[in-house]
Each structure stands twice: as C-alpha cells, then as structure tokens.
Image (spheres, coloured by chain):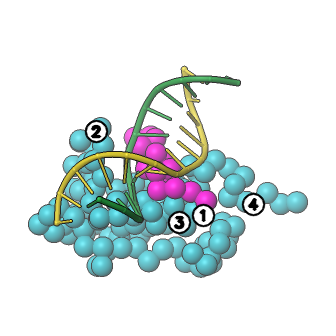
Chain colours: A cyan, B green, C yellow
Amino acid sequence: MKTESPLDKPIYALIRDIVRQIPAGRVATYGQIASIAGKCTPRMVGYTMSGLPKGSDVPWQRVVNAAGEISPRGNFESTLIQRDRLEAEGITFQEDGSIKLDDFLWAGPEWGWLVEQGLNPEI
DNA sequence: CGGCTGACTCTGG
DNA sequence: TCCAGAGCCAGCC
C-alpha cells in the first residue's frame, strides 16, 4: 500500500510542514497548529519550534500563543527577532504587546492541501 | 532501555 | 481579573 500517511514521518516534520503554509502577514496559534496536525498537543508544537535549527526555512515567527503574544522562552534574543520579523510583515502589536488575532489570525490551510497531506479536512 | 528536556492551553477558585 | 495546577508527547543521550 501507499505510505502517504502523515504518521509515516516524524510528527515534528508534519508540524513544520503546516507552519510553512502560514502566509506572511498572518499568525497561527500553537493550539491551532496542533489541531490541524490531528493527534497532537499544543506543547508538541512548541517543542518543535524550539528544536528548529537556526536558519530554518520554517516561518516560526508566525506562531504565537493563544493570547496572541510571543511566548517567553530561554533565548530572549529570538523573542525580539520574532517581533521584529512580524512587524516587517505588516503585523501590528497592541499596547499590551499582543497581536489582535481578530485581524491577523490565519484561516488555516486550504482544504486541498489537507487532503494531500492525508489530514482530516474537517478540522 | 530509562531519564531528561522543551517557544502551551484550559479550568477552577 | 489574576494565579496555580494538571495534562501531555517525541527525540536524543
């Protein structure tokens, strides 16, 4: 049989593929990515982001927490870089330092893409 | 094969 | 409205 199941490769690879679908000028939340991936937790997404190699082609800066804020982490510099990149893409921050998700939240990948990946489009 | 390590989210008081 | 606690999974030594 074919082996196109997303489970065929490491879950981290799948998560990275999904993040790559996020267009510039939009953001997605950890929970949203987890939901798209299927059986996956928001933490897993965060773990994946932390493990990305420097210079990765994955637009990790477009992934924020459920409050629309840049999640705190050990490397403060990367936090600043993240905000800088997002502003460069046209995303604006409110006074409290969060992003207005009503305006910038990604609608999710297209139905066809999900099917290609062997994911459940109903999400 | 056991243990360690990570960039989250939700619920209740 | 704010804070604390619980749930949770894969990779890599």
Residue named by callout 4:
A4
Q: Establish whether labels 1 and 4 are both on one chain.
A: yes
Report the chain holding disc 4. Answer: A
- Mark 3 or mark 2, earlier in chain: 3
Q: Is residue A85 visible?
A: no
**Residue A45 on the magenta segment:** yes
In the image, taking residue A33 as reference, residue A99 lies left or right, namely left
**Residue found at x 61% / y 59%:** A39
Mark-to-mark CA distance, 3 and 2: 26 Å
Q: In which quarter of the image is residue B10?
A: bottom left
The residue under label 1 is A38
Query: How many residues crowd around disc 2 within 10 Å: few (fewer than 14), some, or many (20 or more)?
Result: few
Give the residue drawn at x 47%, y 56%.
Answer: A42
Q: Position of residue A81 (x, y in %)?
A: 25, 49
| Disc 2 chain ID | A
Q: Which amino acid does label 3 sit on?
A: Ser
Direction from residue A99 to residue A58 in the image, left or right: right
Asked where in the image residue A38 lies, by quadrant, the reply is bottom right
Front residue (pair A47, A112): A47
The label nearer to you, 3 versus 2, is 3
Question: Marks 1 and 4, Cα distance to the nearest angstrom?
Answer: 15 Å
Label 1 is placed on what type of residue? Gly
Q: Please tell me which of labels 1 and 4 falls first in the chain.
A: 4
Q: Give the number of the disc on residue A75.
A: 2
Q: Which amino acid type is marked by label 2?
A: Asn
The local secondary structure at tag 4 comes to loop
What is the chain identity of the residue bearing mark 3? A
| Secondary element at tag 2 | loop
Q: Give the range drawn in magenta.
A: A39-57
Q: Are marks 1 and 3 in contact (CB under 8 Å)?
A: yes
